[in-house]
Structures are given as C-alpha cells and as structure tokens.
Amino acid sequence: MVFKRREKRPFLSTLRESVWPRSGWTRAFHYVKHRVNRLPDQPHRIARGVFAGVFISFTPFFGFHFLTAAAVALMVRGNIIASLLATFFGNPITFPIIAVSSVKLGQWMLGRTVDGHQVDTLGETFLAAGHDLKHNIVAAFTPAQTEWGGLAQFFNDIWLPYLVGGFIPGIVSGLICYYVSLPIIDAYQKRRRTRLKERLEKIRAKLAHKREERKENNRQEPPAEDV
C-alpha cells in the first residue's frame, strides 16, 4: 500500500502518541487553527462550525463526537469540517477537567449530593458498566441472560449528570470560541485575499511588461529586404 508504514510502530508508542502527540499539543493546536482558517467558506459559517465542535466536546457521546458535531453544524448552518476539527477542543488534557466539572455540575443541577464514597466508587461504576457491556454482547449470541445493573448505575451516576452538567459549559465555551474565532477567520481571509490580489497584479504587470518588450523589439527590427 502507498501510505502504509514501512516499519510498524510499537503498540506502546501508538498509545503514547494518542495521549501526547510526538510534536506536542501546541503544534497540533496550531495545525488545527490553520486548517480552520483556510477552509473555503464564509467566516460566520466556519465560526458556527467551531461552536458546534466545541459544544459537542462537553457531551458524553464518546465515539460519536464527529457525527453529533456534524449534526449540530447542520442545525446551526455551520461548516461541517470546521465542526469536526473543533472537536479536538476535547483532548486528553482537557477531558479530565471537562468530565469532572460536568459531572459535579450535573449532580448539583439534578439535586444530588456527591460525597466521598461516591467519588471512590466511580472506578467501580466504570468497571461494572464495562462488565455488563461485554457480558451482553456475548449473551446476544448465547443462551446467557443479559445484565443491566452496572450499565444502569453508570447511566444514572455518570452519563446523565455528565450530559446535564456539560450542556451549559458547552454552550458558553462554544459561544466564546465563536466570537473569538469569527474576527480572526475574517481577518485571515481578508489578508489572504489581499495577498492573492497583489500576486495577481504582479503577474499581470510582468505579462504587460513582456508584451511591451515584444512590441518594442518588433519596432526596432529592420524590415526584411526583397531578394
């Protein structure tokens, strides 16, 4: 295959780069920023796409962030590619902050109290949900009975508070990114159009200069003598 690696990367190296890219998150951020600025669309549509991607980063739809971001971008008439790029707002560095704050806020909004015992059992809740999910997949092809206790506890204690608590911070963060990115994208596109216009004018000037040189050379050439 053309794009296949000659030497397969070790599993630990792949896992490490998924958490921390080889070039660092700063360079990854600048890469996404330049890709967003260069999208061929109107600035307000690109900014709406950024809003959609950032907002979805605060939701617990893990594994479906691209699809849900694209859906929200369509709803707000934003750029879909910009929404996909903006989902990188949620990354291994920001996810712990987003998750903890969203779950705590969601618990408060639902009128629940979070004590130390609940915090200590969060890991057990994840393990129980993973066990039920694995068991139910096997049960779909065997006579075994499905189990939903762990998944129900995960939905009630984590997923639902995460969804409720992430809604308001997601909206606020998305709006902030929208109003910050809109003038930046607009200024970038204007500067880029100005540069393209200057390049075109230089090319036209060179072509006009060459045409004038040809005309001048033709005038200076003596007429051909009759044989």
Image (cartoon, helix red, strand yellow):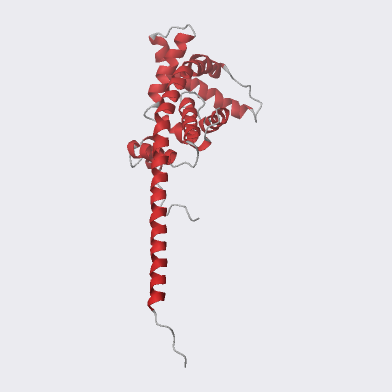
**At 38% across and 50% down in the image, what residue appears?**
198
For the image, the number of numbered tags is: 0
Instruction: Look at 42% across and 39% down and name the residue there.
Output: 37
| Viewer-proximal residue among 109 and 135 | 109
Return the x and y of residue 180 as percentages of the image width and height. Answer: 39, 28
The quarter of the picture where residue 177 lies is top left
Taking depth in this image into account, of 78 and 124 the one nearest to the observer is 78
Q: Which residue is farthest right?
A: 143
* Residue at 49% over, 33% down: 83
Residue 49, percent from left and from top: 49, 32
Tell me: residue 169, above or below residue 200.
Answer: above
Q: Is residue 189 above or below residue 161?
A: below
Q: Position of residue 128 (x, y in %)?
A: 50, 20
Residue extending furthest toward the bottom? 227
Image-based side of 161 in relation to 199, left or right: right
- Residue at x-position 37% and y-position 77%: 220
Of residues 119 and 208, which is closer to you in this image?
A: 208
- Residue 1 x %, y %: 50, 55
Q: Is residue 128 visible?
A: yes
Residue 91, can we see it? no
